[in-house]
Image (cartoon, rainbow, N blue to C red):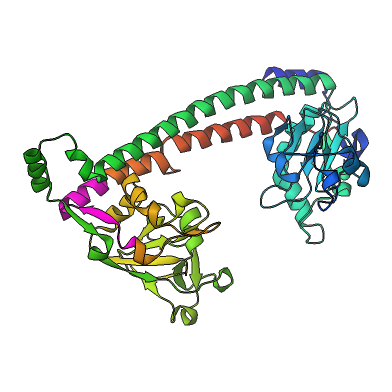
Amino acid sequence: MSRIDHFIASLCPAGVEFRTIGEVADCYSGATPSSRVSAYWEGGTIPWMSSGEVNKGIVFDTEKKITQAGFDSCSTKMVPPSAVVIALAGQGKTRGTVARTRISLCTNQSLCSIICAEQVNSDFLFYFLSTQYQKLRNVSAGDGGRGGLNLQIIRSYRIPVPPIEVQREIVKVLESFTELEAELEAELEAELEARRRQYQYYRDALLSFEERTIGASKQASKQASKQASILWMTLAEIGTFIRGSSIRKSDFTESGIVCIHYGQIHTHFGTWTSKTKSFVSPQFAARLRKASKGNLVIATTSEDDGAVAKAVAWVGDEKVAVSSDAYIFEHSINPKYVSYFFQTELFHKQKRPHITGTKVRRISGERLAKIRIPVPSAEEQERIVAILDKFDALVNDLSSGLPAEINARRKQYEHYRDRLLTFREAA
């Protein structure tokens, strides 16, 4: 039994009292001044918190400020430091997320501020509600199917209220554990970033044959090229670019013919894949253009130049339908080798002058076709791919290496936190 277990047993031998949040705290939501009135925002000095800012965990400042006129124009209220703020609504995983304030601020209408009475430590409440994330989301999802929290749900939510001494001791332990966890995670993140940079450098070195001859004698360069049997060819010389077909997300089905949407190349796929995230019906797929095993699927648009022409090699046995804003690159060499080449600085350097557009950046198949690629022997391509596959797995595979260790640290912390904040309710 831990020291805190002894502490709780001595102070709460019959169990811990549970109360609703509304019984031990004030709860209120905020509001948003009209965005059409510049006088409410320009030159503002009053911190105004939006729902997305709960992801900060601890709020020392806000992204936006409002003026006194803006504050007076709506029903938002000032929230003191050391309050708990919970997202009532929000995009994706935001709803149910909690944060602690460390400054006086006001909030928008999608946030509930909880100001604790003396019998509840606000940091204790923050940590406890952090363990209730999924339960709160489940409660809100069941509230008429609207999928949102409200003040009534928050006020009626039951929480443990052990003696204030116990609350403070738990907070002290968790603060210390959180600090240690943050330090360890920062070290792991730094090491992971170092490995990624090392991998990128090694990948570029392996695939930049031209650079290997810099500084060497002319005869030595010729000999190196001869031994490596390197051919420099344009992408047009080794393959053909075929634009994908129009596929909207509304066309996706639960099963059927595999398909790749161009957006998924940016968010879901790595260097190569044999499986897809999405499917379309056989009837719809019949009129679509498809990539065969060994083809590349290339996303041709992005808001970021670095992501333009991000590619994934399709190595599945069946043909895969490909959406518009993507090209199918049919070619005759090792598909993984080509996909790795598309990640190199040598490729990006050649790509940049061919990118067009303003907000949305894009590149055409005609321009991609002009890019030169080093083509060694099939054996050398296979050797390079084998090396890079191992390196890629070490750095990026969530089932091994440092990312798994970082994830394990987080789960360890969550387990310890949840254990500390689980109480036997008094009869």
- Above or below residue 165? Residue 156 is below
Quadrant in the picture for the N terminus: top right
Give me the residue at 32% from left, 64% from top. 295
Q: Position of residue 376 (x, y in %)?
A: 17, 52
Give me the residue at 79% from left, 32% from top. 125
Q: Position of residue 265 (x, y in %)?
A: 46, 58
184 displayed left or right of 115: left
Observer able to see residue 189: yes
Q: Is residue 383 magenta?
A: yes
Q: Position of residue 270 (x, y in %)?
A: 41, 52
Quarter of the image holding residue 409? top right
172 displayed left or right of 196: right
Give me the residue at 48% from left, 82% from top. 283
- Above or below residue 129? Residue 81 is above
391 displayed left or right of 249: left
Q: Is residue 381 magenta?
A: yes
The number of discs equals 0
196 displayed left or right of 133: left
- Above or below residue 29? Residue 19 is above
Quarter of the image holding residue 202? top left
Q: Position of residue 204 (x, y in %)?
A: 30, 42
Quarter of the image holding residue 131? top right
Give me the residue at 25% from left, 57% from top. 334
Q: Which residues are magenta?
A: 368-386
Using the image as rendered, state which of residue 107 and residue 350 is in the foreground. 350
Using the image as rendered, state which of residue 257 and residue 43 is in the foreground. 43
Using the image as rendered, state which of residue 78 and residue 406 is in the foreground. 78
